[in-house]
Image (cartoon, rainbow, N blue to C red):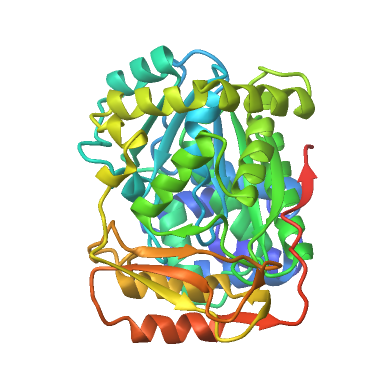
């Protein structure tokens, strides 16, 4: 088999066989096939696309390029959730204990964040004592006993994806639907999930700016999951403005606690109940999405979800007293209000730019080596559609430096006030098959 023949075949719009896909992924991972040939194939895939079988084969070839986490010692259906990212996306912190309170096993592997704020791991480390280093045995035992544990990603998962992604980044082939879908799904499958729920974001603050593109990606990933034996569902959700009110690590932990108490922001609560319902159905703990949602609301109302969050923190060395006393979380030295310059209605909040403002404060990383300031960030006091009077606070800036003029300037440039505005639709589409 020759790589040049595989490139030519895909260039001409023909489907690659399972053997051809395995040959190129295996050869590239080992360093036997050079970057320039894989670049040519990636560009051919970009223009000619891949059919469902090719996408499933490419996903599994990437999965099998490295370690595959074996979670078979954990009882029940292990359901994982993946979000395509956004600003103020606190869902995992709420979802993990919430669905675990219904005996759905959550064996979560999370990474650190690059960008606006930290990843789930960074947010959890805002809680004193919390540690993500668990042995495989302890991880399995915790999930079997208490249904939830979160560890840092370890092992040599999907090395082919890491190489391919770096190459796509510099060859103009990042936006291939087939390559995006296989990249995301390979990581979820290698992490050991039996079933997968996908939160695909759309809007100005999302990777997929249009609902049409977000839906195409969601369908592509759901089909891959189902074609390789992992029951998969998806939600298309709005990211035209930040999710919830908090952008920043300790601030998002506090918001997660409020949401588990039933006192969280309306949009975050709605998204968590929507995603959680799919997780509960896939785990076979409810027959319908309606029944699952009702059960989730019951564990919030009864306090069981909050109790599960406390035991989860305690199990991993975290100070669970922060649940009742959030002042024990890292605190910023300064709280600075951003007053509205006009009266009217908030008509637009550019999510990405607010994320950048939070990163300037120190809430996120521009490079892997950057240190995160866990205390700082932004708290939105108004969302799109809200009425605002001149002088009223739009945002509270949590900072460890007194001068935040650069942050204020960015916020003013990216929060618009008009005579009229409507609240955006949060949940666009549910994809269940």
Q: Residue at x 29, y 58 (%)?
A: 375
The image shows residue 385, relative to residue 199, as above or below, that is below
* Horizontal arrangement in the rendering, residue 398 relative to residue 261 (left or right): left
* Horizontal arrangement in the rendering, residue 392 relative to residue 56 (left or right): left
Q: How many marks?
A: 0
Q: Quadrant of the C terminus?
A: top right
What is the quadrant of residue 406 in the picture?
bottom left
Q: Give the farthest residue toward the left.
A: 129
Q: Residue at x 45, y 16 (%)?
A: 74
Residue 288 in the image, given as x and y percentages of width and height: 78, 24
Residue 211 in the image, given as x and y percentages of width and height: 76, 63
Residue 239 in the image, given as x and y percentages of width and height: 63, 62
Q: Quadrant of the N terminus?
A: bottom right
The image shows residue 300, relative to residue 364, as above or below, that is above
Q: Residue at x 56, y 77 (%)?
A: 172
Nearest the eye: 73 or 280? 280
* Horizontal arrangement in the rendering, residue 40 relative to residue 385 (left or right): left
The image shows residue 405, relative to residue 40, as above or below, that is below
Q: Residue at x 35, y 18 (%)?
A: 142
What is the quadrant of residue 363 in the picture?
bottom left
Residue 165 in the image, given as x and y percentages of width and height: 47, 63
User: Is residue 291 at all visible to an observer of this figure?
Assistant: yes
User: Is residue 18 at all visible to an observer of this figure?
Assistant: no
């Amino acid at each position: 088999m020759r790589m040049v023949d595989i490139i030519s075949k895909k260039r001409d719009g023909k489907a690659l066989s399972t053997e051809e896909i395995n040959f190129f992924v295996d050869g590239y991972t080992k360093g036997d096939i050079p970057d320039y040939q894989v670049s040519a194939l990636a560009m051919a895939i970009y223009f000619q696309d891949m059919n469902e079988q090719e996408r499933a084969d490419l996903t599994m070839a990437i999965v099998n390029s490295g370690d595959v986490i074996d979670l078979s010692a954990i009882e029940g259906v292990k359901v994982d959730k993946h979000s395509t990212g956004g600003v103020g996306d606190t869902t995992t912190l709420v979802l993990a204990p919430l669905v675990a309170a219904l005996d759905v096993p959550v064996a979560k592997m999370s990474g650190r964040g690059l960008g606006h704020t930290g990843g789930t791991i960074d947010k959890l480390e805002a809680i004193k004592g919390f540690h993500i280093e668990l042995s495989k045995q302890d991880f399995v035992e915790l999930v079997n006993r208490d249904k939830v544990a979160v560890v840092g990603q370890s092992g040599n998962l999907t090395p082919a994806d890491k190489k391919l992604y770096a190459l796509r980044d510099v060859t103009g082939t990042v936006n291939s639907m087939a390559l995006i879908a296989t990249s995301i799904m390979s990581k979820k499958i290698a992490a050991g999930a039996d079933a997968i729920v996908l939160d695909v974001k759309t809007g100005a603050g999302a990777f997929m700016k249009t609902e049409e593109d977000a839906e195409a990606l969601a369908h592509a990933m759901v089909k891959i999951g189902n074609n390789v034996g992992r029951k998969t569902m998806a939600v298309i959700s709005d990211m035209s403005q930040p999710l919830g009110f908090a952008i920043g690590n300790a601030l998002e932990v506090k918001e997660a606690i409020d949401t588990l108490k039933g006192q969280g922001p309306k949009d975050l609560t709605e998204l968590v109940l929507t995603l959680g319902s799919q997780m509960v159905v896939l785990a076979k703990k409810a027959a319908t999405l309606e029944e699952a949602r009702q059960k989730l609301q019951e564990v919030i109302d009864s306090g069981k979800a909050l109790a599960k969050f406390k035991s989860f923190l305690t199990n991993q060395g975290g100070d669970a007293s922060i649940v009742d006393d959030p002042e024990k979380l890292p605190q910023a030295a300064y709280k600075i209000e951003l007053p509205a310059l006009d009266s009217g209605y908030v008509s637009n909040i550019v999510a990405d730019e607010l994320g950048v403002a939070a990163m300037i404060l120190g809430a996120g990383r521009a490079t892997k080596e950057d240190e995160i300031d866990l205390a700082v960030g932004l708290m939105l006091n108004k969302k799109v559609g809200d009425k605002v009077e001149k002088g009223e606070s739009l945002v509270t800036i949590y900072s460890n430096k007194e001068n935040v003029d650069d942050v204020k300037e960015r916020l003013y440039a990216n929060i618009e006030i008009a005579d009229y505005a409507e609240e955006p639709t949060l949940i666009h589409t549910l994809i269940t098959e």
